């Protein structure tokens, strides 16, 4: 294995097990192919660990381990560790869908694997993980015996790695849709036709809290996708749960998901519209609104515009709901921090001339572990608020 050497004094973050080496920290990059694994050394020749190179990215190396071990053993042991955690979290529970591998959070940068019952959907984000993909599939087959492994590597960030989008079956037989169980509720998931891997597993804690407090309420689920929050609200005894999304294809699954869980279709209406227009133009006869938009800030540069967008939809909801309403509001923009998001809520409430209380602050669920050495892995903020 070839050696990559850091500039003097640049080994500090690796000594703290941070998994990234930036290009500006590198003194010598050996002659390698994109994605190859290298041994990383300090300028004083101390071995620091093994990592995958991305020659086109600002992040030149993503670490796999901070010890010398054969690469196949490292990958297998990280996957086993990830699986062990999920078994501790979900065995015996009424949930068979979860994030099985959460990239840096599970010590496997560039790799996301979502488990939908016996189907695995894999997202690869880096040149290094592209090379390891085949052995990852072998290990997953060996450990989990899935019926289908589908690769859905379509993230925009792949461009920075010089990678084209990839969507293909890696193992087994296609199963679209597959049916999952989340907290005893069942949903159709479309890995091929759906958004991202097919289902937004990260919002499970927020769906649970909606279910807990939705009793007797009229719920509007904005940015509903396939209606997972709507089903959770109905399961919690909501009087009605309406779903709004800009994508008709996403909305097409909402009724199926509602009916299959035994709820009546008349407790539900779908609106295919932009949430911005809908919230501005309608009186909103609801006392529980959910706002779970896509990332408005994809880059740091987008943050001011994103905050204006968040503020606009939150202000409309806060202003129009009666006293005693709930608002579940979320942001999955990594660049919008929890503090910024809370500050946006402050301005939204002030402009709406209403009092707003934060009841709960949530993030992604325990199947999205945060590596203590990689705080950058945190992105999702969901607040449950009470409007006075
Ligand atoms: N809350 C969902 C996930 C939301 S993903 C769940 O728990 O499953 C974000 C959704 O917002 C997508 O379905 C996308 O189609 C929708 N969307 C994007 N822009 C929108 C807009 N301007 N108005 C309404 N929906 C929008």
Image: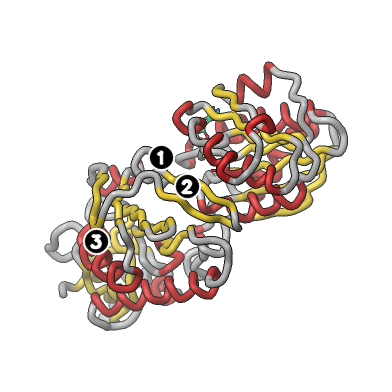
Determine crowd level at label 1: few under 14, some 14-19, many 20+ residues with C-alpha closer than 10 A. some
Mark 2–mark 1 distance (CA, rounded to whole Å): 8 Å
Q: What residue would you read off at disc 2?
A: 199
- Position of residue 329 relative to residue 32, above or below, is above
Q: Which mark is residue 194?
A: 1
Q: Is residue 347 visible?
A: no
The residue at label 1 has a CB less than 8 Å from ligand 1:
no
Image position of 124 (left or right of 189): left
Give yes or no for contact between labels 2 and 1 (Cβ–Cβ under 8 Å).
yes
Which-is-in-front pick, marks 3 and 2?
2
Question: Looking at the image, which residue is at 22% across and 70% down?
Answer: 38
Q: Is mark 2 within 8 Å of ligand 1?
A: yes
The residue nearer to you, when weighing 7 against 97, is 97
**Residue 301: x, y in percent?**
48, 37
Residue 63, image x, y percentages: 33, 68
> What count of labels does the image hold?
3
Question: Which one is closest to the eye, mark 3 or mark 1?
Answer: 1
| The C terminus, quarter of image | top right
What residue is pinned by disc 3? 133
In the image, 134 versus 157, the foreground residue is: 134
Q: Nearer the viewer, residue 239 or 149?
A: 239
Q: Residue at x 46, y 40 (%)?
A: 298
3D distance between C-alphas at marks 3 and 1: 22 Å
Looking at the picture, how far across and down is residue 195, in whole percent?
42, 40
Quarter of the image where one finds residue 11 = bottom left
Residue drawn at x 69%, y 33% is 267
Dot 1: element? loop
Q: CA distance from mark 3 to mark 2?
A: 22 Å
Residue under the point 55% across and 29% down: 245
């Amino acid at each position: 294995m070839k050696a990559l050497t850091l500039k003097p004094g640049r080994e500090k973050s690796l000594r703290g097990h941070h998994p990234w080496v930036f290009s500006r920290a590198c003194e010598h990059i050996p002659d390698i192919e994109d994605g190859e694994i290298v041994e990383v050394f300090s300028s004083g020749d101390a071995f620091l660990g093994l990592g995958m190179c991305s020659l086109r990215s600002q992040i030149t190396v993503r670490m796999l381990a901070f010890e010398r071990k054969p690469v196949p053993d490292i990958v297998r042991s990280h996957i086993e560790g990830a699986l062990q955690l999920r078994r501790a979290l979900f065995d015996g529970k009424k949930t068979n869908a979860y994030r099985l591998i959460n990239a840096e959070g599970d010590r496997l940068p560039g790799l996301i694997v979502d488990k939908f019952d016996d189907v695995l959907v894999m997202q690869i984000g880096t040149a290094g993980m592209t090379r390891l993909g085949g052995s990852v599939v072998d290990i997953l087959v060996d450990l989990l015996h899935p019926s289908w492994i589908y690769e859905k590597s379509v993230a925009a960030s792949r461009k920075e790695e010089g990678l084209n989008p990839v969507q293909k079956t890696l193992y087994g037989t296609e199963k679209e849709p597959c049916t999952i169980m989340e907290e005893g509720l069942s949903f159709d998931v479309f890995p091929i036709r759906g958004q991202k891997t097919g289902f937004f597993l990260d919002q499970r804690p927020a769906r649970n809290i909606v279910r807990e407090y939705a009793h007797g309420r009229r719920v509007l689920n904005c940015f509903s996708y396939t209606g997972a929050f709507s089903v959770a609200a109905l399961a919690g005894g909501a009087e009605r749960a309406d779903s709004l999304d800009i994508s008709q294809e996403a909305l097409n699954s909402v009724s199926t998901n509602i009916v299959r869980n035994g709820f009546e279709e008349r407790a539900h209406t779908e609106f295919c519209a932009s949430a911005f227009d809908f919230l501005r133009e309608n009186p909103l006869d609801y006392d529980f609104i959910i706002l779970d938009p896509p990332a408005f800030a994809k880059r740091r540069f987008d943050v001011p515009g994103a905050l204006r967008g968040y503020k606009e939809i939150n202000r409309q909801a806060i202003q129009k709901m009666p006293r005693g309403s709930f608002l579940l509001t979320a942001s999955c923009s990594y660049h919008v921090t929890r503090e910024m998001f809370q500050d946006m809520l402050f301005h939204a409430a002030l402009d709406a001339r209403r009092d707003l209380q934060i009841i709960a602050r949530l993030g992604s669920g325990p199947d999205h572990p945060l590596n203590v050495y990689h705080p950058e892995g945190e992105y999702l903020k969901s607040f449950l608020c009470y409007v006075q």
